[in-house]
Image (spheres, rainbow, N blue to C red):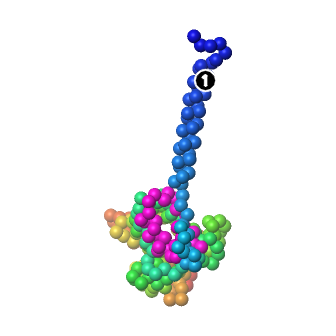
Amino acid sequence: MQPVGLNYSLISKLCFMKKNCLLFFILLFQVRLIAQTTIIVDPDNSGGTNTYSSLREAFDYIKNAASLGDVFLQIAGSTTEPATATLSASGSYTSVTIYPASAGLSIRGNAATGGPLIKLDGAANVIFDGRVNMVGSEPNLTITHENTAQPAITVAQSSDITVHYCNIQGAATAITTGILAFSTPAGNRNITISNNYFTGNSAGRPANGIYALGTAAETNSNFIISNNRFYDLL
């Protein structure tokens, strides 16, 4: 017999609801714990936790780290890259967003290996956002490669890539490449290139702003190229 005044049906429902609410908050807390990682690139203040002197060093860390979730890579100081900064496919990250912390910052160099300044090789969910702290409409990050044979940025067999609000400079004079180049062995897909400035630099004037190469078997697909400015090309 149930004691008078107690509604066991209501008590059971409340307990069920509390268990589910507790489970929801536990899951939400776990998701927030692995949500994102901030990495800082600053040649003047490197050596601290998740702080590196070049984009290349930061990319190398991302490729070899444990699970980082969504990575926000903040450019806090201008860098001179010693060699190609390569980001490849990795289970360590869900996405990578590169952006400047203040106006007038640059990523520059003349890759000693004869490659591009930046290479995305099998990468996915990568954003170069040249706006300060990803806010506004002004391009404030300059990416400039002074090699006359190689692109500033090469994208190969990658997907879901966005490059916007950047000043991208190169000097490659061959007609088979560009300041930004998409290449084989596999096609690239879901690419957005918007609101950038493409031009030459002190090393010379490039032949092409954007160059895309594919094959019959490995095509490039779903490209959106809009609201970019191209000037001082050959």
| Left or right placement of residue 5 versus residue 218 in this view | right
Q: Is residue 29 magenta?
A: no
The image quarter containing residue 187 is bottom left
Q: Position of residue 7 (x, y in %)?
A: 63, 18
Tell me if residue 29 comes above or below residue 60 in the rendering: above
Residue at 53% x, 61% y is 37
Residue lying at 57% horizontally and 24% vertically, measured from the top left: 12
Q: Residue furthest bottom?
A: 203
Q: Quadrant of the N terminus?
A: top right
User: Looking at this view, is 203 or 74 the one in front?
Assistant: 74
Q: Percent x, y for residue 23?
A: 54, 38
Q: Which residues are magenta?
A: 50-76
**Residue drawn at 44 percent across, 70 percent down:** 60
Confirm whether residue 66 shows in the render: yes
Write down the residue under mark 1.
11
Instruction: Verify whether residue 67 appears in magenta.
Output: yes
| Rendered position, 69 above or below 182 | above
Nearest the eye: 37 or 221: 37
Relative height, residue 44 to residue 223 (above, below) = below
Q: Amino acid at mark 1?
A: Ile
Q: Quadrant of residue 201?
A: bottom right
Which residue sits at x=40%, y=83%?
A: 114
Q: Nearer the viewer, residue 229 or 91?
A: 91
Indicate the secondary structure of the residue bearing disc 1: helix
Question: Crowding near pointer 1: few (<14 within 10 Å), some, many (20+)?
Answer: few
Residue extending farthest to the left is 217
Q: Is residue 208 visible?
A: no
Give x and y (percent) for residue 103: 64, 75
Residue 147 in the image, given as x and y percentages of width and height: 45, 85
